[in-house]
Image (cartoon, grey):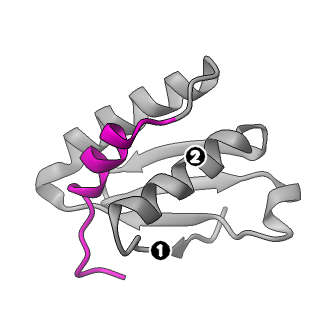
Amino acid sequence: MASFKTLTPTNVNDLYSNLVQLHENRNHVKSIRVDSIDQMVKIDLDMMANIKVPDFQIPIKSASLTEARETVEQMWGDSERGHPPTMGQAERLFHCIDISRH
């Protein structure tokens, strides 16, 4: 089972930059999912990526779990079709982040 490091982006530009980097390296991403129990977006990377970057998670407000799940599913689907995340998607996800948990 993967051990996830909790990361909390400081602003929407930081989150957007990280999402674009995930898109550009999507072949090393095993999964991105919203865990309703832990209230986290969990990013599980393959072993090659884990050499430099640990698996990580982003805390989500309980009231925003559905919106976060919809946003993540849309972004990941777009990424699999070759389209990078948009700033609008990053803004939507950023508003779901629970900045009090880091």
Between 13 and 72, which is closer to the camera in this rendering?
A: 13
In terms of image quadrants, where is residue 8? bottom left
Residue in the foreground of this view, choosing between 38 and 93: 93
Q: In which quarter of the image is the C terminus?
A: bottom left
State left or right for residue 49 relative to residue 58. Answer: right
Residue placed at 30% from the left, 60% from the top? 39
Residue under pointer 2: 20
Q: How crowded is mark 1: few (under 14 residues within 10 Å), some or many (20 or more)?
A: few
Q: Position of residue 51 (x, y in %)?
A: 86, 69
In the rendered image, which quarter is residue 62 located in? Answer: bottom left
Q: Position of residue 94 (x, y in %)?
A: 29, 56
Circle 1 SS class: loop
- Comes first in the chain, label 1 or label 2: 1
Is residue 50 shown to the viewer in this render? yes
> On the picture, is 57 further left or further right than 98?
right
Quadrant where the N terminus sits is bottom right
Q: Is residue 23 above or below residue 36?
A: above
In the foreground, 56 or 78: 78
Magenta-highlighted residues:
85-102
Residue under numbered circle 1: 7
**Near-viewer residue (11 or 52):** 11
Residue 38 appears in the figure: no
- The crowding category of the residue bearing disc 2, from other C-alpha atoms within 10 Å (few below 14, some 14 to 19, many at least 20), is some
- Determine the residue positioned at 34% across, 60% down: 12
* Left or right: where 94 falls relative to 8: left
Mark 1 against mark 2, which lies toward the viewer?
2
Where on the picture, by quarter, is residue 13? bottom left
| Residue reaching furthest to the top | 81
Q: Residue at x 39, y 47 (%)?
A: 34
